[in-house]
Image (cartoon, helix red, strand yellow):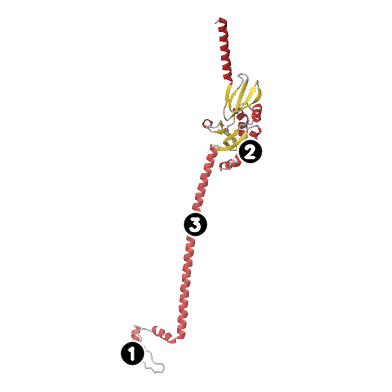
Amino acid sequence: MSDRTWGCLIIGAVLSLFFFVYLVAGVTSVDAGSVCVMTRGGDIKGTVNPGWHWKWPGMQEYHCFSTRTLVYETGQNPKESGATFTDYVVGSQTNDGQSVSLSFSVLYHVPTDPDDVMNLYRTQGTTTKELNEKIVKVIARSASREHLRDFDAADLYSGMTSELETEIEIDVKLFVESHGLVFDDFLLRDILFDVDYLDAIEQKEIAREQRDAASYKAEEVRTIAEGERDAQEIRAEGEAQAMITVAEAEAATIILKGEALRNNPEVLQLYAIERLNPNVTWGILPSDSSFILDLEGIAEVTPASAD
């Protein structure tokens, strides 16, 4: 072969290699869970769905957004979070002037409709991170600060957080959806109170427990005193009832004795005789008999009685 032929072959091989590299460089893939906006010279030419695609290198560009659920999360240790985008807690003051910080999560995603995606790219941002910064982060932190001022610290500390969470969620949802993203959920994860406020709450709780203990002790003493008083009243009632019972028994006995004496006069005579001096000798005679006194016997008995 002549030198000219070899020269043509070499040029052809170089051009072929260049063309092959150019073709390979234009091959690209779009990951599942993503959608891309294709631009050429700065103009939007459409969207590209997941799969293999070929683009003109240097002429066409793909700007991709994740369509998976994205999470913007605030916390005390953002680096330890597994959320898509992390940030520090949002600090603000409550209605009664207490310093409070919020930890929360916002869940959202990029729409898959081509027109919505192109509008997002055209008006809001060219990357998922930029969308998060301009839309989600702005409204979430702003709404949290604003609505914290509507509540007293004591209400939040006692667990009345659902209303706060609802108010923030409404604002975040309206703002996010009005700017082209799809809102999924807002989760209020934690409310962090100032250390001085927590100390004051703890002291107040201790004082309350002490008051409760004192009140319980006083109630216990009062209960014991009432029990003793009731016992004394019961004993007094019992004694009074016993005295009444004894008196009633004695009265009944007297009545029975009176009736017995009225019905049996001889019993009265017997009773009188039993009451005589035991040294007197006596006897009972028939009522129609005459009796003779033993004067000597009486004379003997009388001195003895005098002794």
- Classify mark 2: helix, strand or loop: helix
Give, as a three-letter code, the residue at label 2: Ile
Mark 1 or mark 2, which has the lower sequence index?
2
Mark 3 or mark 1, which has the lower sequence index?
3
**Mark 1, residue position:** 297
| Disc 1 packing (10 Å; few <14; some 14–19; many ≥20) | few
Image disc number at residue 34: none
* Left-right relation of 123 to 89: right
In the picture, which quadrant includes the N terminus?
top right
Mark 2 or mark 3, which has the lower sequence index?
2
Give, as a three-letter code, the residue at label 3: Thr
- Say if 88 sits above or below 298 in the image: above
At which x and y percent is residue 269?
42, 86
Name the residue rendered at 48%, 65% in the picture.
234
- 3D distance between C-alphas at marks 2 and 3: 54 Å
**Mark 3, residue position:** 223
Query: How many marks on residues?
Result: 3
**Mark 2, residue position:** 170
- 3D distance between C-alphas at marks 3 and 1: 78 Å
Front label number (1 vs 2): 2
At which x and y percent is residue 175?
65, 34
Give, as a three-letter code, the residue at label 1: Gly
Outermost residue, top side? 2
